[in-house]
Each structure stands twice: as structure tokens, then as C-alpha cells.
């Protein structure tokens, strides 16, 4: 039996879809760790990237720091943080925290760079026109720059999600479950159907995550949403003409 047949046979075996080591449980573990890391990375990188893109301050430092983060291999980063996390928590500091921290570190660069690029590349004529109409800096950012930067920002989130999902697989080396456990267990048991099934499941999860953020970016820039934003922006302009205290957007 070839690898493709073994993989199909393993994936279609009902036994592998139930129990504590079943595919739904492993996918859930993988997603929980990945979503947690992506959320933390987004909370750290998105505001910073948007601020740098809007103000232009610290752009070189932010980009260089992001590129440095990209240069460190995932497994090396996990190995670097293990002694520190294990000192904090002997159990989770070896099984979960090193992988989680590495995932956050790897997710920050694409989110930061795309947020910065998306906002910074908005046509300056548009932003200057918005300021000329009396909009505050916050209104310019929320009403003009962010809506136009959404596709680029969503692309960064999609890239980060792919890296996070791939890195979560390495957690199985340190005892974390997730889909990576199929790779480590399959290799130890010489069950190549299990190994390649794990590879397929990780790939499908990564592609689904990237497609989700792509569709989200398109949905947030659909004509209906943009018209609604334009109406809100016009109302904010009218309020700003009535006085600064009425100009909240």
C-alpha cells in the first residue's frame, strides 16, 4: 500500500474520529493554542503597527525588530525560552508555554508589518483632505486609513495564522497534544499513514485559516460596508463643524 492509500485509510477509519486522541479533540487542542497565540500577538502588534503607520514614528525600529523576529527558527526559539518558562512552571513551562511564546513571537512580525504598511500606504491626499474638512487625527485613522488598510491588515493576520498553526505542530515534541502528536506518534510507531494524515490536517487547517482572513478582508471592504462607513464619516464631519466636543466618531 502506498503513502496516499495509507493516509486515506487512516483518515477514513472511524476509530480515529473518536476518543481523547481522536481528530476532533486534536484539532480542538491545536486551534485553542493557535487562536490564543494569534489573539495575544494581535493585541500587541496591531495597535503598534497602526500607530507607526499613522504617525510615521519609529517605522525603521519596528520593521527591523519584526525582521529580526522572522530570522529566528521556531524550534530554536522554543529551545531558548524553555529554561525560563520551566523555572516559572515546571509542568506548563515545558509542555505549553515555550511553544505558545514562540507562536506569539512568530505571529507578531507579519501582523505588525502589514498593519504599518496598510495604514502608511493610504493616499496622503485623502488623509490631508479629511483633515482639511475638520476631522481629528482619530477620525482620520478610523474613518479613512483603517477602512482602506483592512485588506492588507487581514493579509497579515492570515500569514500570522498560517505560521502559528504550523508552529503549534512543534509543541508535540515537548508533550503538547494537537495535530503534531500524530507526527511524533506516527514516526515512533512507523505508522506513515498517521504521519501524513497529521501533515494533511495541519495543511488543511492552515489553508482554512488563511482563506478565512481573506474572506474577512473582502467582507469588511464590501460596497455596502464602505457606504455605511462613508455615511458615518459624513456625520462625523458635520458634527466636527459644530464643535470639537461633538466630533467623536
Image: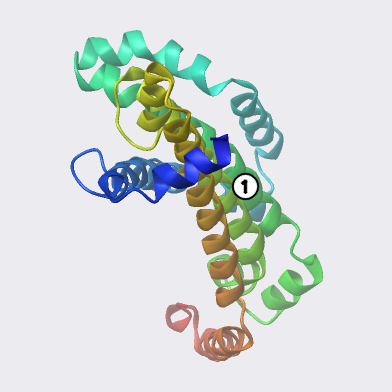
User: Whole-percent x and y of residue 45?
Assistant: 51, 44
- Look at 63% across and 35% down and name the residue there: 62
Q: Is residue 166 above or below residue 50?
A: above
- Look at 32% across and 11% down and name the residue there: 84
Q: Is residue 56 left or right of residue 27?
A: right
Q: Is residue 63 left or right of residue 157?
A: right
Which of the 4 image quarters holds residue 10? top left
User: Whole-percent x and y of residue 237?
Assistant: 58, 86
Q: Is residue 94 left or right of residue 123?
A: left
Observer-nearest residue: 229 or 23? 23
| Pointer 1 local density, CA inside 10 Å: few below 14, some 14–19, many at least 20 | many
Observer-nearest residue: 145 or 173? 173
Instruction: Let me know if residue 165 appears in the view.
Output: no
Q: Is residue 137 above or below residue 114?
A: below
Q: Secondary structure at mark 1?
A: helix
- Look at 45% across and 11% down and name the residue there: 80
Observer-nearest residue: 170 or 219? 170
Indicate how the structure is coloured in the image. Answer: rainbow
What is the count of numbered marks? 1
Amino acid at each position: 500500500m502506498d503513502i496516499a492509500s495509507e493516509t486515506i485509510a487512516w483518515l477514513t477509519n472511524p476509530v480515529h474520529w473518536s476518543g481523547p486522541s481522536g481528530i476532533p479533540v486534536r484539532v480542538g487542542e491545536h486551534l485553542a493554542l493557535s487562536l490564543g497565540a494569534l489573539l495575544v500577538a494581535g493585541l500587541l502588534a496591531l495597535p503598534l503597527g497602526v500607530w507607526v503607520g499613522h504617525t510615521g514614528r519609529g517605522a525603521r525600529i519596528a520593521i527591523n525588530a519584526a525582521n529580526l523576529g522572522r530570522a529566528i527558527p521556531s524550534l530554536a526559539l522554543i529551545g531558548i525560552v524553555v529554561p525560563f518558562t520551566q523555572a516559572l512552571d515546571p509542568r506548563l513551562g515545558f509542555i505549553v508555554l515555550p511553544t505558545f511564546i514562540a507562536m506569539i513571537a512568530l505571529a507578531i512580525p507579519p501582523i505588525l508589518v502589514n498593519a504599518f504598511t496598510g495604514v502608511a500606504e493610504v493616499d496622503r491626499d485623502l488623509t490631508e483632505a479629511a483633515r482639511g474638512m475638520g476631522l481629528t487625527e482619530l477620525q482620520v485613522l478610523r474613518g479613512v486609513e483603517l477602512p482602506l488598510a483592512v485588506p492588507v491588515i487581514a493579509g497579515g493576520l492570515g500569514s500570522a495564522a498560517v505560521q502559528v498553526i504550523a508552529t503549534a505542530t512543534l509543541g508535540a515534541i515537548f508533550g503538547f497534544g494537537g495535530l503534531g502528536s500524530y507526527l511524533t506518534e506516527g514516526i515512533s510507531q512507523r505508522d506513515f499513514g498517521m504521519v501524513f494524515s497529521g501533515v494533511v490536517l495541519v495543511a488543511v487547517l492552515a489553508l482554512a485559516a488563511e482563506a478565512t482572513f481573506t474572506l474577512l478582508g473582502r467582507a469588511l471592504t464590501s460596497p455596502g460596508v464602505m457606504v455605511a462607513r462613508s455615511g458615518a464619516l459624513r456625520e462625523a464631519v458635520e458634527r466636527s463643524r459644530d464643535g470639537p466636543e461633538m466630533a467623536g466618531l
